[in-house]
Image (cartoon, helix red, strand yellow):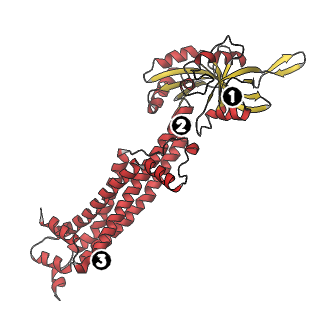
Amino acid sequence: MSYEWFISLRYLRAKRKQTFISIISFISIAGVSLGVAALILVLAVMSGFTDGVRQQILGNVPHVLIQHFGDGIEDPQGVVAAAKQLPHVLSASPFVSKEAMLLSKGNVSAVSVKGIDAEHKILSQPLLTLDGQPVTGSFFNLQAERPGIIIGLDTASSLGVAVGDSINVIPPLFTMTPFGMIPKMKPFQVVAIFEKQSSLVDSFYAYIPLTVAQHFFDLEGVVSGIELEVDRYDRAPQVADSLTAQFGFPTVIRPWQSIYGSFLSALKLEKLGLFIILGIIVLVAAFNIATTLIMVVMEKNRDIAILRAMGATARSIMKIFMLEGLIIGTVGTGLGTAFGVFLATYADVAIKFVERAFGIRIFDQAVYGMEHFPSEIVFSDVVVVVTMAMIICLLATIYPAWRASRMDPTEALRYE
């Protein structure tokens, strides 16, 4: 161990008359620890919320959406075949979409009726059915007296219907008769009901078989668009670019980022803002480190002068006090990192314990549509926080250490 390290560690041990300085050192360590822990916890929670929101979005919208500018796609099978040839594409589902009114038992609800095929992801999700069996068979039974329709729980509640009930679908289309124009209307049977917490997008949709929708909406052989699912959400832009280069205008191909990317960007901006605000806590703790070192330098005037007289260089004196501040910063950052990672890991457990103990509601799962309190520790975020805290603590030691290295030993010993 070099003598600079030895002296730095000795200065951290308080003598009786230096207890106040030692208390300030512990306050500095506590400040750095709390600041680092708060940063890690908040960034983990924001990352968890962002991931939860992204999963909700991707549960409601396709990863890549293919549409035709100003019109439908007249050759959907060719586009589907080309899309499935690309790597990372799991499925390609053509659909027909049209706004309509649902009428049942004197109640009316406005929805977007979407005609889908057997590969659509809504059919792979948990659905409330009459017998608890998969809905695919009855849904695509075109020989049934009434075609099947799948509606959301909110829509079912508004209409007062359950699985097995009949619903009349009224699109904005009219049939010419001798008595004038009459709105088209077709009865459907509710074969399943889906529920997604806090899912305003899906509660607005109702699903019917694709061939029924094409015939009902006068779109024989034409689809409104094609929805693609990829194996990883971040590969959607790559797939969209490949298809755009293959088809070009007037085919419009958009990844999910272009549809809802602005919302996720707002969450990232909020995460950055919280990082900057909470980083001020670490900055305040760094000022405490600087204050501690300044008081130590004032207290150790004679010791510094003796060291200089014994041959210690100005660089060694500066190194002693920088190491002292660095030790305070390292201990504070280490404790804060451990505490922050612990809180972020067990955030959901802690919140549920507080809710049970005090009978209060902190995290309402129904509001956020998440089963657990979101907290995801991102390794890169932890590294950034630790690096930032160490740099701030190191910068806080420069001025006090520089002042100590510039001290004139003859002036310090003149009156000793």
Q: Given the current orientation, which residue lies at the most extreme top position?
A: 143
Q: Which residue is mark 2?
A: 56
Residue 121 position in % (x across, y down): 54, 25
Q: Nearer the viewer, residue 362 or 172?
A: 362
Q: Residue at x 53, y 21 (%)?
A: 92
Can see residue 70? no
Secondary element under disc 3, as helix, strand or loop, is helix
Q: Is residue 386 left or right of residue 211?
A: left
Marks 1 and 3, Cα distance to the nearest angstrom? 73 Å
Which label is found at residue 20?
Answer: 3
- The answer to whether 37 is drawn above or below residue 162 in the figure is below
Helix, strand or loop for disc 1: loop
Q: Are marks 2 and 1 in contact (CB under 8 Å)?
A: no
The residue type indicated by label 1 comes to: Ala
Q: In the figure, is residue 273 to the left or right of 61?
A: left
* Quadrant in which residue 254 is drawn: top right
Of 8 and 248, nearer the camera is: 8
Q: Mark 3: give few (<14), some (14-19) or many (20+) Cα within 10 Å.
A: few
Badge 1 is on which residue? 162
Measured from the top left, where is residue 309 in percent x and y? Answer: 11, 77
Q: Which circle, 1 or 3, is nearer the viewer?
A: 1
